[in-house]
């Protein structure tokens, strides 16, 4: 059978950085060609970054993408790589009106192209457009209606983009009909917990349906709230794993494949009405050679390490891509700020993490002690600024009581953090977790201030688990565990009044989080949650708190998404909303 050395470049890109992304394609193409690759691939919308959101609606940006693609083809040829086909994702537009979709000529498309010999020799657009979760592709794009096939060294390679594999029909069965020897899918698939196993099962299934080896190339890095974890996969026609790339690591997977020889040039219309668009670049197979890279499977990260790594990668990408070199965290001695600080130290380096302890009259002695211990363990820089004098000055003027008095302390801390951010240029991190955000257990313009919330999508029970895992991992490596043990073991408290505990206002987190996972993550109704064995009054209480806190969540900063449904683009509820699952 013909042989083909495939290079899958599992790399990062930045939205809007056409020059930087083009340079990355050239760099990694050079690396791939030096490894002897015969076909080189890059992720979905590599040239523009992903997702571009409403930038897709700007004709100027679409045209800039198209021009950058043509310039990239010429540059690859000028650099001496023109003989090697390169598949790269970009933003395109249709030339003809699309009345079926109500779109005029010029409507944008999520597209990819094959570059060869200094030219754009083949273009195609994503056929299946996702319209769920964080995806709004029906809002932006019109679908492609072709099955692109490129013949490389006597092998027909069918091409697809991300959702083309996730949905039934379309390009997968069409690849079988066309007699493809390899199905190559380029992707920008965001990370979610447990998604790696789902992806593997999917790729195996699609390979069997396509009747050919299948390569699933994924992006890594981060974009706003999304994290991309790589985990590129290549399987044979029966679903057997040939190669699997590391998670959250940039790199190039190179492997030699033996693939079926191409038959007569396919043509016509196949499954789902797709028109075959076939381009022959090299009809004859390569002379037989001894395979040098036969593929390997990178070890999988265990669950807690995977989630923690995603949080680190998400914060690191957000800070770097937005030009922030240092971060600022309010340290209370509690578990949330401790975990946030540990993530920050791993993301940007402890020397670039600044902590501020802001004790009040209600702060326990151990709160400041635990903040100081965290600083000693991690090496972050800590200063202490008591808020008592500021609090007293406000109280003399306003004479606040009850919740207003409690929230004033939090807002003074938020004001101080933002003032230091303005003065010193640090990005402020909000340490709120998903349990608190769900129930509105946070203070607007207080503990909710910041530019990024690293644990925004992490339930409280998982916060504890991740802190324990991070300490355990450090000990196993002979390092100092970053999170003070007392921050993990003491009862959680906002410390805004004497002897306050979170359980004064919230159910036990173990129960609360299980109810929230059903209501928030899975959209289960009140009756179904009660039927799962939860106390009806407790469920009513949790649902009422969650529903009434939507206005707070809408004002919370972005943060790394790790679940199937975070408090962001994938969960959009009206703030003004009289529907209640509880009936009142």
Image: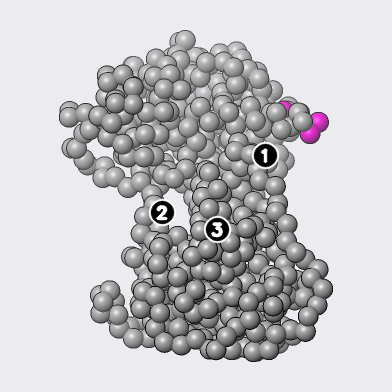
- Dot 1 lies on which element? helix
User: Residue, x 45% and y 23% (percent of image)?
Assistant: 509
Find disc 2 in the rendering and name its residue. Answer: 134
Question: Which residue appears at 60% of the width and 32% of the height?
Answer: 466
State which mark lies toward you, 1 or 2: 2
Q: Which mark is residue 204?
A: 3
**Quick check: marks 3 and 1 in contact, CB under 8 Å?**
no
Q: Residue 134 occupies which quadrant of the picture?
A: bottom left
Q: Are marks 1 and 2 in contact (CB under 8 Å)?
A: no
Could you say which disc has been placed on residue 292 in the image?
none
Front residue (pair 302, 82)? 302
In the depicted view, which residue is nearer to us: 224 or 123? 123
Q: Which mark is residue 345?
A: 1
User: From the viewer's perspective, is 320 left or right of 158?
Assistant: right
Up-down relation of residue 192 to residue 22 (above or below)? above
Disc 3 element = helix
Q: Is residue 318 visible?
A: no
What kind of colouring is applied to the model shown?
one colour
Q: Position of residue 227 (x, y in %)?
A: 54, 51
Q: Residue at x 43, y 19 (%)?
A: 508
In three-dimensional space, the C-alpha distance between marks 3 and 1, rounded to whole angstroms, equals 38 Å
Numbered disc 2: secondary structure: loop
Query: Around disc 3, counting alpha carbons within 10 Å, would you say few (fewer than 14), some (14 to 19), or many (20 or more)?
Result: many
Q: Is residue 478 magenta?
A: yes
Q: CA distance from mark 3 to mark 2?
A: 25 Å
| Magenta segment | 477-481
Judging depth in this view, the residue of 387 and 124 nearest the camera is: 124
Q: Please indicate whether residue 484 sits to the left or right of residue 35 in the image.
A: left
**Where 477 sits versus 390, above or below?**
below
Task: Look at discs 3 and 1 and give the one toward the viewer.
Answer: 3
Q: Quadrant of residue 272?
A: bottom left
């Amino acid at each position: 059978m013909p042989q083909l050395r495939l290079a899958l470049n599992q790399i990062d890109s930045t939205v809007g950085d056409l020059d930087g992304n083009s340079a990355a394609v050239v760099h990694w193409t050079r690396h791939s060609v030096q490894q002897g690759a015969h076909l080189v691939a890059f992720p979905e919308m590599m040239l523009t970054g992903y997702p571009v959101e409403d930038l897709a609606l700007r004709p100027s940006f679409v045209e800039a993408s198209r021009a950058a693609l043509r310039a990239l083809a010429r540059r690859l040829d000028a650099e001496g790589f023109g003989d090697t086909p390169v598949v790269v994702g970009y933003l395109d537009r249709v030339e003809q009106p699309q009345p079926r979709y109500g779109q005029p000529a010029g409507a944008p498309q999520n597209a990819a192209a094959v570059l060869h010999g200094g030219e754009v020799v083949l273009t195609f657009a994503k056929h299946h457009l996702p319209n769920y979760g964080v995806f709004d592709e029906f809002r932006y794009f019109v679908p492609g209606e072709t099955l692109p096939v490129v013949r490389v060294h006597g092998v027909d390679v069918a091409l697809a983009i991300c959702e083309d594999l996730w949905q039934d029909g379309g390009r997968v069965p069409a690849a079988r009909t066309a007699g493809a020897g390899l199905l190559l899918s380029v992707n920008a698939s965001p990370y979610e917990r447990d998604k790696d196993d789902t992806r593997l099962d999917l790729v195996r299934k699609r390979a069997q349906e396509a009747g050919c080896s299948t390569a699933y190339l994924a992006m890594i890095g981060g974009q706003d709230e999304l994290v991309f974890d790589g985990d590129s996969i290549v399987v044979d026609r029966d679903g057997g794993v040939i190669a699997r790339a590391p998670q959250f690591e940039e790199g190039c997977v190179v492997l030699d494949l033996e693939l079926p020889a191409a038959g007569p040039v396919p043509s016509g219309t196949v499954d789902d009405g797709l028109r075959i668009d076939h381009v022959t670049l090299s009809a004859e197979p390569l002379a037989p050679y001894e395979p040098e890279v036969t593929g390997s499977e990178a070890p999988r990260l265990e669950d807690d390490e995977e989630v923690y790594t995603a949080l680190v990668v998400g914060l690191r990408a957000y800070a770097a891509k937005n030009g922030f070199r240092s971060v600022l965290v309010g340290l209370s001695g509690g578990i949330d700020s401790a975990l946030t600080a540990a993530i920050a130290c791993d993301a940007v380096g402890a020397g670039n993490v600044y902590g501020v302890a802001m004790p009040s009259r209600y702060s326990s002695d151990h709160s400041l002690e635990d903040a100081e211990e965290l600083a000693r363990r991690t090496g972050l820089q800590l200063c202490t600024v008591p808020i008592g004098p500021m609090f007293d000055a406000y109280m003399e003027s306003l004479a606040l009581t009850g919740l207003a008095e409690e929230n004033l302390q939090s807002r003074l801390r938020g004001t101080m953090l933002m003032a230091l951010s303005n003065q010193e240029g640090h990005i402020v991190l909000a340490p709120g977790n998903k349990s608190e955000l769900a129930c509105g257990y946070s203070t607007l313009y207080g503990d909710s201030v910041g530019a990024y919330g690293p644990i925004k999508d992490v339930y409280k029970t998982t916060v504890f688990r991740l802190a324990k895992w991070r300490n355990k991992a450090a000990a196993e490596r002979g390092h100092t565990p970053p999170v003070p043990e007392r921050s993990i073991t003491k009862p959680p408290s906002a410390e805004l009044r004497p002897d306050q505990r979170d359980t004064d206002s919230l159910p036990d987190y173990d129960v609360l989080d299980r109810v929230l996972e059903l209501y928030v993550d899975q959209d289960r109704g009140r009756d179904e949650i009660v039927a799962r064995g939860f106390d009806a009054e407790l469920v009513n209480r949790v649902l009422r708190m969650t529903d009434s806190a939507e206005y707070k969540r809408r004002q919370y900063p972005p943060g790394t998404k790790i679940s199937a449904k975070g408090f962001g683009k994938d969960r959009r509820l009206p703030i003004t909303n009289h529907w209640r699952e509880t009936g009142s």
